[in-house]
Image (spheres, grey):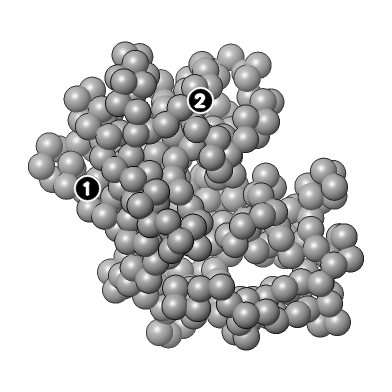
Amino acid sequence: MNVLVTGGAGFIGRWVVKRLLEDGHRVTVLDDLSNGAESNIEAFKAHEGFRQFIRGDIKDEALLDEVFKHPFQLCYHLGASINVQDSIDDPGTTFDNDTVGTFRLLERCRLHRVKIVFMSTCMVYDRCLDESGITEAHPAKPASPYAGAKIAAENMVLSYYYAYGLPAVVVRPFNTYGPFQKFGGEGGVVAIFIKKKLQAEDLQIYGDGTQTRDLLYVDDCARFVVQAGYSDRADGQIVNAGFGRDISINDLAKLIAGGESRIRHVEHIHPQSEIQKLLCDYSKARRLLGWEPQVTLEEGLKKTEDWIRTIL
């Protein structure tokens, strides 16, 4: 197939591109590089299936019209503003990128009958209340403009499925980590912690560190995202992916640092938008896609640390 990947030069995007190329597809990447880096996909440019990299904004309608002159069968939409604190400081930019940008892309997918897989986030959920995990029917709680913009975009995506019969899937991966994740910002807690460990610096934890995360290795995440595009059974659905095990940030820091001596707690920058417990129930992904995670947290941490060592 001819496949368009927005945000394909980003952290998860480059792994999606890698898997699509390995599966024999022809891939075009559209990315404004606000979160990604062209170096992330440099190794793919010599691949016979890599068509082109286009630096541009998904809100640029003239650009989208030009991009969609080439026929696509499938669009993976990963391009977005992703930082919670940025969305609190400047909600307009996040709304424009994540909601309006998604609408602009949806219109082209509708006009050209291109299936769309929309990358949402586990941050749309309210906290997990028990050990059974968060299913897709779990209550949403947009505790940040980032989460609110993603929910709005999800609803637009699903409306195109119902109103126009456009094949569309909403995917909600839980906290993804692994090689090529940036060290800066708030989302890459694993990468940040490992980098600080390797540089003999203190690991700083927001708040009391009892908040938990369900950590999904990036190659497992990419495999999930790609399979959602291949499967007709997922059309019109919201689908979670996670490891199915949560860990407190305190315990994660101890696991990475090998002890508590270099762990420091600092004031939380946005406690009002913190989700205290995130634990994924991925049974729907298993049922619809035959997907399950393959990389354990311990294996994933080692893979990530090995990669970070090569670039420090």
Amino acid at dot 1: Met
Q: Quadrant of the N terminus?
A: top left
Q: SS for tag 1?
A: helix
In the depicted view, which residue is nearer to us: 214 or 195?
A: 195
What percent of the width, then of the height, locates residue 213?
A: 55, 71
Q: Is residue 211 visible?
A: yes
Q: Nearer the viewer, residue 210 or 66?
A: 66
Which residue is at a point 50% across and 63% down the rendered structure image?
85
Amino acid type, residue under disc 2 in the picture:
Arg
Question: Disc 2 versus disc 1: distance between alpha carbons?
Answer: 25 Å
| Visible residue check, residue 113 | no
Q: Which residue is mark 2?
A: 55
Q: Residue at x 70, y 81 (%)?
A: 265
Count of all numbered marks drawn on residues in the image: 2
Query: Is residue 73 toward the left or the right of residue 27 in the image?
Result: left
Q: Is residue 116 left or right of residue 261?
A: left
Residue 106 locus on image (x, y percent): 26, 36
Disc number for residue 203: none
Above or below: residue 250 compared with residue 289: below
Q: Is 245 in front, or is 17?
A: 17
Q: Is 72 located above or below residue 277 in the figure?
A: above
Label 2: few (<14), some (14–19) or many (≥20) C-alpha neighbours in 10 Å: some
Which residue occupies 38% across, 44% down?
97
- Which mark sits nearer the N-terminus, 2 or 1? 2
Left or right: 207 with respect to 24? right
Check disc 2 and report its element: helix, strand or loop.
strand
Whether residue 254 sits left or right of residue 292 in the image: it is: right
In the figure, residue 63 lies in which quadrant?
A: top left
Percent x, y of residue 91:
38, 57
Q: Residue at x 51, y 16 (%)?
A: 51
Residue 186, x across and y down, in percent: 59, 62
Residue placed under numbered mark 1 in the picture: 156
